[in-house]
Image (cartoon, coloured by chain):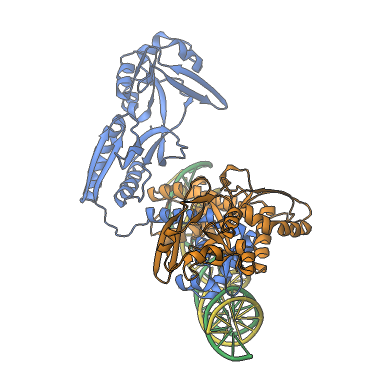
Chain colours: A blue, B orange, C yellow, D green
Amino acid sequence: MSDVATLKVFLTVAEEQSFSAAARLLSMTPASVTRAIAGLEAELGVQLLLRTTRKVSLTSAGAVYAARVKPLVLAFDAASEAVREEDGITSGLIRISAPLSMGLRLLPDAVRQFRSLHPATHISLNLSDHFVDILSGAFDLAIRISTAPTDKSTIWRKICPVPRCLIASPKYLEKRTKLQMPDDLSKLACLAYAESGLTETWTLSKDQSTRTLVAGSTFSSNSGDMLRALAVDGEGVALLPEFLVEENLRNGSLIRVLPDWQPTELWLTLYYPPYEKLPLRVATFSDFFEKYVNDRPPLTS
Amino acid sequence: MSDVATLKVFLTVAEEQSFSAAARLLSMTPASVTRAIAGLEAELGVQLLLRTTRKVSLTSAGAVYAARVKPLVLAFDAASEAVREEDGITSGLIRISAPLSMGLRLLPDAVRQFRSLHPATHISLNLSDHFVDILSGAFDLAIRISTAPTDKSTIWRKICPVPRCLIASPKYLEKRTKLQMPDDLSKLACLAYAESGLTETWTLSKDQSTRTLVAGSTFSSNSGDMLRALAVDGEGVALLPEFLVEENLRNGSLIRVLPDWQPTELWLTLYYPPYEKLPLRVATFSDFFEKYVNDRPPLTS
DNA sequence: AATTATTATTTCATAATATGCAATAAACTT
DNA sequence: AAGTTTATTGCATATTATGAAATAATAATT
């Protein structure tokens, strides 16, 4: 009931102004057309078509319904076409945008593996923390670390959560005492990650309580590695993905600050331009990348 | 296959990231959800969802498909709602726009009959030959005589063809001889129907041949009745709907000119604003009007 | 490491639905 | 008035959908 095929029958009858002509066009029996229309009308509780045995015309409801439904049917077909895979050949150029620090750690091996699986592909990799406009058409795929996406206009695919933690050097923390609440951070030097501005908003939560503060009074950078280096040198507290500071936490050059307070969850996410048709090579790389990321322990502590 | 219900199942699974949660939400068995998704994937020839027994996520194709299909499903539901009739009470104000001469001849009786059938309705009737913008929201319904509509942006419903004919007074034609081709009309006074300009384009066809000429060198008016009066007075040739000149043809005050040459067909058409929801009173009046028009011989000669 | 719990899938018998063919009724044409 | 085209309906048959229970797979827990 109410499937797209039925709508196509209705639109064809409306256009041809004939049940039998529609049946011929759609290679079905007149009986099926009758039943399809009758079913649609029963479902809507409204008569859509006025029929005598010699003439068929739309009712007002039918005219309104046809006008509204026709573009939907076309768009539905287009959506199916955009996703359907016919040939099965994965080849061609894949233009990928990825963040710098994550890309340098994860992508060399991933790209190597992918290329050996699909030798007919070429990869153009743009490493930048700047959130390039995926709608510009310059990329087939953008890998980003961001808060969980809820966009309506862009198409995205969540890969895995990226846990972050507050860190500082032990030396830096020695001098400061009584760091028990996020509010205490305001007395310290908070190293902010920021593309252009000076500040970053940190939201920390523990059980039900949530605290928000503005970091970045002393220093900000658009490079996570830079912030990490400064934190190691005892310049202040930074909020960074765990994969960036894993090594430092292990060797003790950095330690966690307020470990009970959870920062907002970030997600490794794939963003796509609004493809007319999703290229197979992009789908293949995406699926490979998700598997690659989730088959190794990393990104998590 | 590919009915809207299946798409809703897919979108629910994608949102819940769980087959069983979707099944609970939609009051169906997990088995049905599995089969719905499997069927959709088979139809598209693409995997849409990645599932382990503990986690469900979208593939790239799935993300693209979900993003494109979700607004369509919502729009489809809205279209159904716009047309569905629940209460069945026909009442309220119906704001109708209609052309002057046709309205004066047809509507008095039609409105009277409709009001006696549906006493709870009120009718506001605006008679004007000016093509009021139906999109402005000032009217629920516009009755127009125009060439067969092919609009995409407006919603219309064809009621019946409105035959036209070339006419002139016998006295006027007496003086002119050898009127055999449309081209000969250029030597005569052609009375043009025009809203504001001076001219009207007449297209006449006979068998395969078509002739186009510009009428209106001497006189134009936006009133069919005015043109008729002038033609009766022997002022020239006019191209008018037959229902306007029926009486004159019968009593001989006007006669047909070039009766073998058919002017472009006009249609009596209903136009609607892009309703969020088609009001029952509008649908009822439209259906009544079509029946009223087609149950009487008129408009045709 | 073994157990437990949850989840997606499959199997199978049964119920529901769709389909085509032929017959019927209605409306326009000749 | 007869003939033709058209929409609809009845009926027997084939196809498909459905739910319950069994199965397989994966996390979480002990």
Say which residue appears at 48% left-offset and 23% top-offset: A203
Pick the front one: A163 or A248: A163
Examine the rendered structure and indicate whether residue B85 appears above or below residue C16: above
Pick the front one: B256 or A194: B256
Q: Report x, y in % for residue A152.
A: 47, 40
Res A12 visible: no
Q: Report x, y in % for residue A227.
A: 33, 20
Q: Quadrant of the C terminus of chain B?
A: bottom right
Q: Quadrant of residue A210?
A: top right
Q: Is residue B250 left or right of residue A277?
A: right
Pick the front one: B241 or B82: B241
Examine the rendered structure and indicate whether residue B49 appears above or below residue B297: above
Pick the front one: B210 or B221: B221
Res A65 visible: yes
Q: Quadrant of residue B253?
A: bottom right
Q: Report x, y in % for residue A176.
A: 43, 9
Q: Report x, y in % for residue A288.
A: 32, 47
In this view, the residue farthest toward the front is B175
Say which residue appears at 78% left-offset and 52% top-offset: B120
